[in-house]
Image (tube, rainbow, N blue to C red):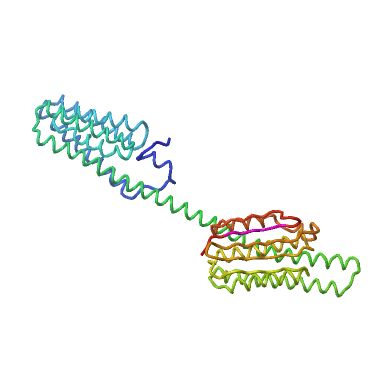
Amino acid sequence: MPTRGWRCGPNQRGTVPTMGRPWWVLPLQVVVGAYLLYGLVAGVLTGAADGGPGRALLVAAIHLAGLGCWALVLRRRTAPFAVLAASAVLGLAAHWLAPFSGTTLLYAVVWLAPFRTRLWQALLLTVLTTGGFVLVSLDVGLDPSANYGIAAGLGWAVYIAAVVNQLATTKRQTAAVAAARADAAVLAERQRMAREIHDIVAHSLAAQVVHLEGTRMLLERDGDREQALERVRQAGDFARAGLAETTLAVAALRGQHRPLAGELAGLAGDFRATTGNPCELTVEGDPDVLAPPARLAVVRTVREALTNVHKHAPAASVTIRLRCGDDGCELDVRDTGGTNGGVLAATGSGYGLVGMRERAELVGGSLDAGPHGPGFRVQLRMPGP
């Protein structure tokens, strides 16, 4: 469960992806296990020398219980704080029976605490363990200089363990952040490709659909053959235009582009040629100061707006105004409205406005679209270069 402050061990692992253990964990566990076994043997020998076989057996039993606690903490079988506290008590008991025989258990407690408990719990265990060691040492009459040296060593042990644990935690969190950024980059690329498919392929195919549909109707009604051939030629023109737009999009993604005013003039000219309706273009300032993503947003917004006019108001005229200055750029596309819907009205995917808004947000701008008088208005605002 989340808490404030720095948390160690399993509490932090709940917030990052599970990763494999570092290579050094198993060797470290082997070393600590060997160290505890050494403490067991040394404690038995010390206990036998000080109090005979009975005390040696009691010290051995205490160390075996401490080894059991150590194994439980490593395998996370129970509450680590309580088990480590019990192990510290066992170490102090062994130290009281045979001086310094429980030191290995005490060092194991302060070393494992930062890896298995919260930081404040690890510090509390270290303070209590160190204080208990000093008190027991004074009670049995040991040399104070040696006692204070071991007490300082216990403090340094928990400090080093906390630093190592924090480094491992930071590494896991860094890897998790990198993975999240990679996932976000993949998602952004998918969204970008979806917009490109809609803006290029969908527009080209929609225009071809209307001309091919008109050709079919003419042929079914024994209409004018020349008119049918003209519609087929126009469908082919749209297919070639779509291919050309794909090439231009690839060039734009590579940082190659032609003047923005020229691109917008081409779109306005295509609209006039296709619909026979007026399309007025006004450009104020220098639009070529825009960064490539902003340029692409302007071109795609104009294209989408003109296509929507063609779909939903085929008799409408259009005015396009682009103004660029130090305070930013503003694009305004308006149509005069008219008959709602045409053959193309049912060919859209419904993602046109969504794509325009996504492009505007990607360049730090905003897009407003909605009815304006009898017609429709699309307004794109972007920050200055």
Query: Which residue is located at x 81 percent, y 58 percent?
Result: 339
Query: Which residue is located at x 63 percent, y 64 percent?
Result: 300
Question: Residue 318 at x, y = what percent?
Answer: 72, 64
Residue 377 among magenta residues: yes
Give 51 or 360, whichever is nearer the viewer. 360
Using residue 83 as the reference point, say whether residue 346 is left or right of it.
Answer: right
Residue 279 in which image quadrant: bottom right
Query: Which residue is located at x 29 percent, y 36 percent?
Result: 122
Q: Reply above or below: 376 against 321.
A: above
Question: Residue 172 at x, y = what percent?
Answer: 39, 48
- Magenta range: 376-381
Give 354 or 285, whichever is nearer the viewer. 285
Give 36 or 137, whichever is nearer the viewer. 137
How many numbered circles are shown? 0
Give 296 or 241, whichever is nearer the viewer. 296
Q: The N terminus lies in which quarter of the figure?
A: top left
Using residue 318 as the reference point, say whether residue 105 is left or right of it.
Answer: left
Residue 319 in which image quadrant: bottom right
Question: Residue 231 at x, y = what percent?
Answer: 80, 71
Q: Reply above or below: 318 against 122.
A: below
Residue 264 in which image quadrant: bottom right
Residue 174 among magenta residues: no
